[in-house]
Amino acid sequence: MNLFKSVVASAISSGIPNFPYTFGDRQDIEGGIWQLQNGQKRDDGSNCSIFSFDINANKARLPLARNALKKLRTLRHPGVMKVLDTVETDTFIYIATERVIPLRWHIKRKSMSTETLKWGLFGVAQTIKFINDEASSIHGALRVASLYTSESGEWKVGGFEVLSSIKDDEAIIYTYGSLVPETGRYTAPELALLGWEAIKKSPSTAVDAYNFGTLIYEVFNGDFSGPEQAGQTKGIPPTMHSSYRRLVTKNPKARVSVGNFLEQGRRNGGFFETPLIKLTDSIESLGMKSEDEREIFLQDLDDLSDDFPEDFFKMKLLPELLKSVEFGGGGPKVFGVVMKISKKLTDEEFETSVRPAIVRLFGSPDRAIRVCLLDNLPLMIDRLPPKVVNDKIFPNMVSGFTDLAPIVREQTVKAVLTIIGKLSDRTINGELLKYLAKTSNDEQPGIRTNTTICLGKISKHLGVGSRSKVLIAAFTRSLRDPFVHARNAALMALAVTNDAFSEEDCALRILPALCPCLIDKEKLIRDQANKTMEAYLGRVRKHASTMADSVLPPPTTEIATATTPRMGTPQPTEGASWTGWAISSFTNKASAAAGEIQQNTNVALPVRLTPPVAEPRRSAPTTASASASILQRQALASPIVLSPQTTGSQSPQTTSWEPNDAFEDEGDAWGDMQEEAFFDASDSTPRPAPPAATPFEEDGEPDFAGWLAAQNGKKPNAKPLPKGLAKASPNITRPGSGGRPATTGSIGAKKAPVPLLKAKPVIAKKVDTAPKPQDDDDGWGDGW
């Protein structure tokens, strides 16, 4: 920290002009004349490294620092550290480069695999070959300490302190070569014996060839202690032994150059013929490769294991692959490799390098790319924020719901499950449901089936207000699908979404739709239908057990208890059956007479029944006939009876549901019906008071009897329907009454419009026991 403060203070005091970088943490570096610190560019915050040389502390090696500064400025190669900026003051020399890390860190920790070490040496060999051949120069200080790794994991060559041109007779290497730190361990035998001037008498590549040999030993063993280890093959791959020995031979004229060593390794089956090296050697030309060459490239890429340099894949390979997919026709296979590599990226790296390309690719018209994107959505959905999914990806994705290719439609439906968690409620319950409604009617049965499965799995994301409506409509429709798997999917979806529906929906809408599946032609459907049916029946039964026994209000007065008639509750009796009480109900209804009516020649007016005026009763009717009369009048709304006293104002009367003495003689007509338990209602049972009856107006009860007579082509004086289905008509003879008239007037008399009049009390009617003429005897008997 003190050193860092002194460096910054010195830089500020010396007034560094135009050096837009900030100093960061110091990096330990061995065997060099430079101090290495991390840095950042002030404009954009990008990372860099800053090499600094303290002139006052190391004046003897100032020529080496200045030579390195000069050569780094002028020498450009992908294997050489990229220089961003340089500054030289009276006290310091600063060189800003791309962010690098000393290779020695990895070598000491042995964190690189053998294939990665070969790949690194291959890159260094290419760089040294360029320096020796194209640049006609000698590096002179090649070792682990002069190598660095970039952010992409590539090995970069530095240490240009004595880099010299072979054409320069006064080159710095001849004079200052011995001032390079740790020169004694790495100096070639001829130089140790004859001095640095011996370079002029040997091939120009000899020094760098020897140092490259010692570098091979060092990277595979972690350290190189001296000339005695040169030529040892410990840790070095066997395929490299022969060529490696020729690099470190003591005779400089017998040494192979680094260029020749590179060629030997690139031969068929050579030590540099590895998938990683072949991949990196051709990655930049991927967009220009033919289809067959691209297939070979991807095959080599698939052969790579996870111990290869991740940084290279992230920083170097990934951008090239994205370019190939987006612009070079790389296709789905290349994109699959992109997704494989992106799994190792941090969220920040993914957002910077991959996300923009993915968003653009979703708008691609290439169906193969779109299907590949949908297939790989699970790998990237967690790194896509909801806003990007809603605003940029989903609008381009929905075109797949209506695509002409079935595979695109199917994959789009499947992808809904992946992105549903990132969509807004408005998008789900609006646009998405509209498209799913289309795919549920798709011509492809598989797409219809997948749509049903999709709806079942996303049910919890649907709006509460529309969830049950949408699911019931979709699933019940799928139950009728001719495709067996679509029906099965609907049954299973209904089973897993049981809790999404109310008990009323279960009983009224779902269970009826499930019933046809119980007798489906396919056993698969029948079995699943039984399972689903049991689930819903169990829920409905559980709900029914919590319901009240009845919704009828309790009685409030003793009068209501005594006077209010009600339907009898069927009691379980020994030997009773559904046919028995049905016939009994029918006969009781037929026996319930509404009373006897006096003949009246005036216009018939409808009146309501009123409580009878107290008068001596002839005889008490039997319990069964009274109960039947009350039940008939309550359940079937007995025909309106005319009062014999309605001659003046003809006002309608008030309805009464109390028993009337006028019905006391009906027991003789229908006999005793106490044998049916359905009608065994005790008069002491509390009965709720019924609402007051209201006469029907023009929009009231339809004249069903008249309509039926018209349908049969009969005139109004035809035989009437059974009592309870026809309105009250004059001059109808009651069956079993001995020919007594039941109404006034004659059959077929035309009714006049009935005005609504004010009700007034009715005087008790007098029973007419006169016999009825025989010509009307077929009124009920034949009609029934």
Image (cartoon, rainbow, N blue to C red):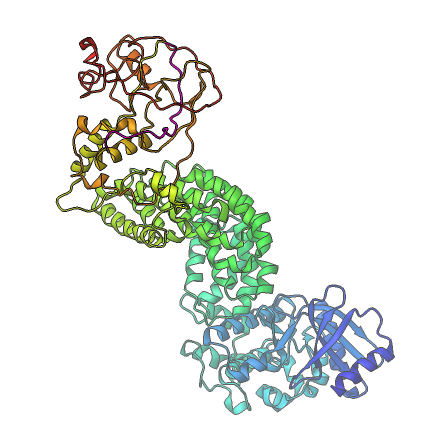
Which quadrant of the figure contains the N terminus?
bottom right
Left or right: residue 610 versus residue 250 is: left
- Magenta region: 602-619
In which quadrant of the rendered view does residue 507 lie?
Answer: top left
In which quadrant of the rendered view does residue 2 lie?
Answer: bottom right
Which quadrant of the figure contains the C terminus?
top left
Is 740 or 328 nearer to us in this picture?
A: 740
Q: Position of residue 605 (x, y in %)?
A: 40, 16
Up the image or down, 79 lies above or below 249; here it is above
Is 658 or 205 nearer to us in this picture?
A: 658
In the displayed orientation, state which residue is furthest to the front: 616
In the displayed orientation, state which residue is furthest to the left: 575
Up the image or down, 752 lies above or below 183; here it is above
Is 585 or 74 nearer to us in this picture?
A: 585
Left or right: residue 530 versus residue 443 is: left
Q: Quick check: is 316 in the magenta stretch? A: no
Q: Position of residue 23 (x, y in %)?
A: 75, 76
Image point (19%, 13%), residue name: 777
Q: Position of residue 35 (x, y in %)?
A: 71, 82
Q: Position of residue 751 (x, y in %)?
A: 38, 11
